[in-house]
Image (cartoon, grey):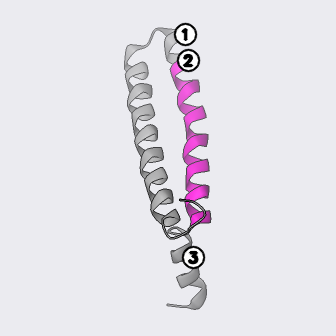
Amino acid sequence: MSAMAKKAKNFKSSKSGVYVSLGTTAFGALSVVKQARMARQDKDTLRLIDAAVSAAAIVTGLAILYRELKRLGDDDVLLG
């Protein structure tokens, strides 16, 4: 594995990688909100259920990323 590939692989488990993942996951929430609004407007129950399941997945993903961020911060004395 080249040095560049190793660096890219380690980015996902770094603090900045977790922050990027948090941002992209939170950005996905905007799409779910839009989907839920359209489903309520059209009175489409199936799409509304899909939006609710997607929202639950986003919340779970954010919780996992937050836990990962706390785990990475445990080594830092200033973060507590």
Residue sitting at x 39%, y 14%: 45
Mark 1–mark 2 distance (CA, rounded to whole Å): 5 Å
Q: CA distance from mark 2 to mark 3?
A: 38 Å
Under circle 1, the secondary element is helix
Q: Earlier in the sequence, mark 3 or mark 1?
A: 3
Does residue 12 appear left or right of residue 4 in this picture? left
Residue under the image location 37 percent in, 22 percent down: 49
Q: Which residue is mark 3?
A: 8
Q: Amino acid at mark 2?
A: Met
Q: Residue at x 52, y 67 (%)?
A: 12
Front one among 23 and 72: 72
- Asked if residue 33 is among those painted magenta in the image, a careful observer would answer yes
Magenta residues? 15-36
How far apart marks 3 and 1 lie (CA) works out to 43 Å
Which numbered disc covers residue 38? 2
Mark whose residue sits in front, 3 or 1 = 3
Q: Is residue 21 magenta?
A: yes
Q: Position of residue 2 (x, y in %)?
A: 55, 91
Q: Which residue is mark 1?
A: 41
- Residue 34 drawn at (x, y percent): 59, 25
